[in-house]
Image: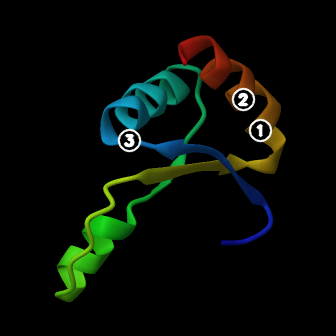
């Protein structure tokens, strides 16, 4: 991923959905990376169901504060 985007969350599906929804409410459009879904679509299987959420570098501080208040 480009250095313009930073990872703000790595965790389970339920927490990720809550964070994504909250980010959209404050007009931040996150990028979600789901390696297990990508592997499934490619015909491979992995057990890990963790998601990574990235935001643009300019929005990182706001997103980080929001995530701290959620978790």
Instruction: Determine crowd level at label 1: few under 14, some 14-19, many 20+ residues with C-alpha closer than 10 A.
Output: some
Horizontal arrangement in the rendering, residue 9 relative to residue 44 (left or right): right
Instruction: Determine crowd level at label 3: few under 14, some 14-19, many 20+ residues with C-alpha closer than 10 A.
Output: few
Query: Above or below — where is 2 with respect to 19?
Result: below
Q: Nearer the viewer, residue 36 or 32?
A: 36
Question: Which dot, 1 or 3, sits closer to the camera?
Answer: 3
Horizontal arrangement in the rendering, residue 55 relative to residue 15 (left or right): right
Q: Residue at x 23, y 86 (%)?
A: 42
Residue 60 in which image quadrant: top right
Question: Which dot, 2 or 1, sits closer to the camera?
Answer: 2
Q: Which mark is residue 12?
A: 3
Instruction: State the residue position of label 2.
Output: 64
What is the residue that sits farthest to the bottom in this orientation? 43
Q: Position of residue 45 (x, y in %)?
A: 21, 78
Count how many numbered circles sit on residues in the image: 3
Q: Are marks 2 and 1 in contact (CB under 8 Å)?
A: yes
Query: Above or below — where is 66 with respect to 50?
Result: above
Query: Above or below — where is 68 with respect to 38?
Result: above
> How far is the residue under mark 1 from the one under mark 3?
20 Å
Residue 64 in which image quadrant: top right
Say which element carries label 1: helix
Closer to the N terminus: mark 1 or mark 3?
A: 3
Instruction: State the residue position of label 1.
Output: 60
């Amino acid at each position: 991923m480009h250095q313009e985007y930073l990872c703000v969350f790595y965790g389970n599906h339920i927490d990720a959905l809550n964070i994504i929804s909250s980010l959209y409410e404050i007009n931040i459009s996150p990028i979600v990376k789901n390696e297990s879904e990508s592997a499934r679509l490619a015909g491979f299987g992995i057990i890990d169901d963790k998601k990574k959420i990235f935001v643009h570098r300019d929005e990182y501080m706001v997103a980080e504060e929001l995530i701290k208040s959620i978790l």
